[in-house]
Image (spheres, helix red, strand yellow):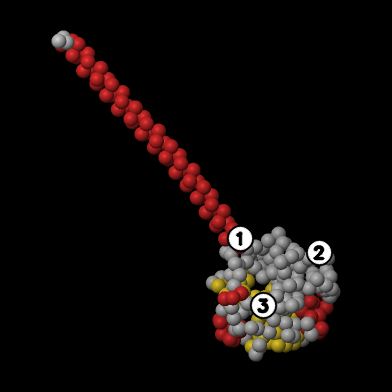
């Protein structure tokens, strides 16, 4: 029979073994927890990175960061950036204010063009009016959301394509803060190319912010002085044709719109 001392030593040995096994269990549990936490951290980091990338993609493709989505003359920059091709001398604008009427479908807009603030762009309007360019051209692009509202017109073929034989620059009379009030008439251009202004223009139908890019903002030629409410009620309020809605939130007007006439004096 074991002595009391032997029994005590056996009990102490069993207790040491139990404590050791308990510590081992705790250590193993902590190891598993660290591995789990590391895995969760890695997955979380991947998710955060993916969300950040997705947010940037959306911001620069369908959100306000397009470069902006903004009016643009065509998907490609002019071949002769920095050169004016087919554009009249800016002296044609005579450094004065030109007034007239722009008719879209049967909506008559009174307009005023500032030949002193934007002589090159206004001279382009005068030349196009005298050549009869605008009559029959369509308004191919509409933005109709809060803080981003315009109707773009004047494309050579009605698809948004630019005229390879006509472009000019630089950007004139662009607002420093990027805010274009309702009624503003400005020139569309290719992102990053200040010499890609052409025939296309856009009419702001509600206060809109268009951040500038490497070329600056958008040349403001003048404003609509009357008829903007009728344009909104009869054309733009109908919204965008859903079959043409693009990722940038713009598309063709649901009501097909054509430039009926333009007069300037």
Q: Nearer the viewer, residue 106 or 26?
A: 26
User: Where residue 18 sits in the image (x, y, percent)?
Assistant: 27, 24
Q: Is residue 113 above or below residue 3?
A: below
Instruction: Tell me which residue sits at (58%, 86%) in the image.
Output: 234
Point out which mark residue 140 bears: 3
Point out which mark residue 60 bears: 1
Locate residue 27: give its quadrant: top left
Instruction: Tell me which residue sits at (67%, 79%) in the image.
Output: 139
Q: CA distance from mark 3 to mark 1?
A: 22 Å
Q: Secondary structure at mark 2?
A: loop
Q: Which residue is mark 2?
A: 79
Does 83 sit left or right of 23 as displayed?
A: right
Q: CA distance from mark 3 to mark 2?
A: 24 Å
Q: Secondary structure at mark 3?
A: strand
Instruction: Tell me which residue sits at (68%, 84%) in the image.
Output: 258
Instruction: Tell me which residue sits at (59%, 81%) in the image.
Output: 254
At label 3, counting other C-alpha atoms closer than 10 Å, the crowd grade (few under 14, some 14-19, many 20 or more) is many
Q: Nearer the viewer, residue 186 or 245?
A: 245
Q: Earlier in the sequence, mark 3 or mark 1?
A: 1
CB under 8 Å between callouts 3 and 1?
no
Q: Is residue 235 above or below residue 55?
A: below
Locate residue 157: give its quadrant: bottom right
Q: Earlier in the sequence, mark 2 or mark 1?
A: 1
Q: Residue furthest bottom?
A: 106
Q: Secondary structure at mark 1?
A: helix
The quarter in which the C terminus is drawn is bottom right
Point out which mark residue 38 bears: none
Q: Is residue 128 above or below residue 20?
A: below
Does 201 sit left or right of 81 as displayed?
A: left
The quarter in which the N terminus is drawn is top left
Q: Nearer the viewer, residue 100 or 202?
A: 202
């Amino acid at each position: 029979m074991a002595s009391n001392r032997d029994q005590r030593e056996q009990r102490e040995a069993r207790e040491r073994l139990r404590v050791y096994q308990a510590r081992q269990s705790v250590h193993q549990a902590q190891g598993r927890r660290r591995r789990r936490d590391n895995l969760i951290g890695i997955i979380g980091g991947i998710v955060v990175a993916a969300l950040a990338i997705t947010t940037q993609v959306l911001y620069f493709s369908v959100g306000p960061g397009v470069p902006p989505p903004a009016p643009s003359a065509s998907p490609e920059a002019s071949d002769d950036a920095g050169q004016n091709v087919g554009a009249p001398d800016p002296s044609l604008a005579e450094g004065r204010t030109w007034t007239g009427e722009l008719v879209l479908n049967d909506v008559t807009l009174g307009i005023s063009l500032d030949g002193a603030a934007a002589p090159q762009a206004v001279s382009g309007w005068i030349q196009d009016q005298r050549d009869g360019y605008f009559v029959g051209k369509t308004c191919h692009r509409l933005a109709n959301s809060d803080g981003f509202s315009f109707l773009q017109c004047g494309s050579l073929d009605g698809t948004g394509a630019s005229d390879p034989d006509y472009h000019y620059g630089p950007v004139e009379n662009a607002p420093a803060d990027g805010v274009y009030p309702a009624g503003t008439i400005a020139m569309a251009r290719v992102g990053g190319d200040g010499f890609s202004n052409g025939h296309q223009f856009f009419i702001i139908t509600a206060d809109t912010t268009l951040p500038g890019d490497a070329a600056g903002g958008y040349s403001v030629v003048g404003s609509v002085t009357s008829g903007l409410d009728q344009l909104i009620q009869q054309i733009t309020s109908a919204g965008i044709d859903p079959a043409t809605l693009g990722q940038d939130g713009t598309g063709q007007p649901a009501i097909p719109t054509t430039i009926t006439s333009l007069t300037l004096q």
